[in-house]
Amino acid sequence: MSDAINAEERHFLTIGSGRDAREIAMILRPAAGGGDGPSLVWLSGYRSDMSGTKAVELDGLAARLGLASIRFDYSGHGLSGGEFTDGTISRWLEEALAVIDHAAPRRAVLVGSSMGGWIALRLAQELARRGTGPDLDGMVLIAPAPDFTSELIEPHLSEADKASLSSRGYFEELSEYSPEPNIYTRVLIEDGRENRVLTGIIETNCPVHILQGMEDRDVPYRHALRLMEHLPADDAVLTMVRDGDHRLSRPEDIERMLAAVSALVAKAE
């Protein structure tokens, strides 16, 4: 279930300036007793937010383990400002980095769902490139969708979709999870090409545990297999859930997620 976020729990961080400025909503829970374990960082999927079931359950795990937790809404999502149609991987990655910089954890475990898995992989690359920010103790990727714009959307565009992208700058697709259609913009697709990670070895410099449903109609399990091929230098584990769908939010799926995160935390101690 989702949680009702109280006004006193959320804080806002201004990112960008001028017309590009947007207010990013976040919830930062400190570690109990000033513990020095890794912070648990939640990275939502496309059109998802920090009040979803998996995000709330991760926050609860952090509380039980005495760890800090970080969750936020991308611009155009949830409680954050900004227009959804302005969103790109680069823009949402910038926001993730800014929130992490603001929270300033010394260590972190990244937990990314669907598109959040792509953001997690790009975060690892950017943190390594900068040489600043938290050390990563691991990441759990749930039905990860790296490069989904170029790998899962572009190859299947219809002529009508292409015409809509050309004339309107976006196309719509019926959503299985919402009465509102998914909107994919030309700028999102073009920016996605600049953020591809399935182009060579992905150096995360931390253990990775992927959870993937074999009944996932949005991100086929073969996509997770392909991602594994790009993680040969790391301690990577792939768990296939035979009857799992894209959301992986059933009680048994949540338990798998929490167990995977707990194992990474224990390994880091």
Image: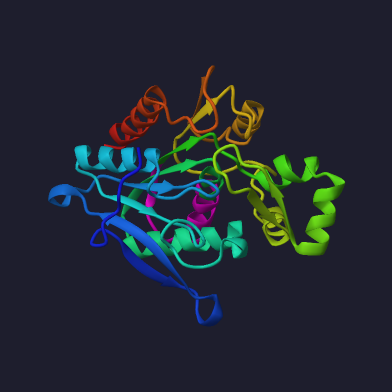
Q: How many marks?
A: 0
Residue closest to the far front: 179
Q: Nearer the viewer, residue 205 or 69?
A: 69
- Classify residue 254 by image quadrant: top left
Q: Nearer the viewer, residue 3 or 87?
A: 3
Residue 211 at what x, y percent from top left?
49, 29
Left or right placement of residue 15 versus residue 2 in this view = right
Residue reaching furthest to the left? 33
Along the horizontal axis of the image, is 110 left or right of 227? Answer: left
**Side of 142 relative to 146 (left or right):** left
Q: Position of residue 176 (x, y in %)?
A: 59, 37
- Is 147 contained in the magenta span? no
At horizontal 59% and vertical 49% (from top left) the residue drawn is: 180
Q: Which secondary structure is most common in the magenta stretch? A: helix
**Above or below — where is 139 with respect to 71?**
above
Residue at the bottom extreme, as displayed = 18
Identify the image quadrant of the C terminus: top left
> Is the N terminus in the top left, top right, bottom left or bottom right quadrant?
top left
* Residue 142 in picture, x, y percent from top left: 49, 35
Q: Residue at x 34, y 27 (%)?
A: 259
Residue drawn at x 53%, y 59% as measured from the top left? 92
User: What stretch of residues is rendered in magenta?
Assistant: 120-137
Residue at far top of view:
242
Q: Nearer the viewer, residue 156 or 195?
A: 156
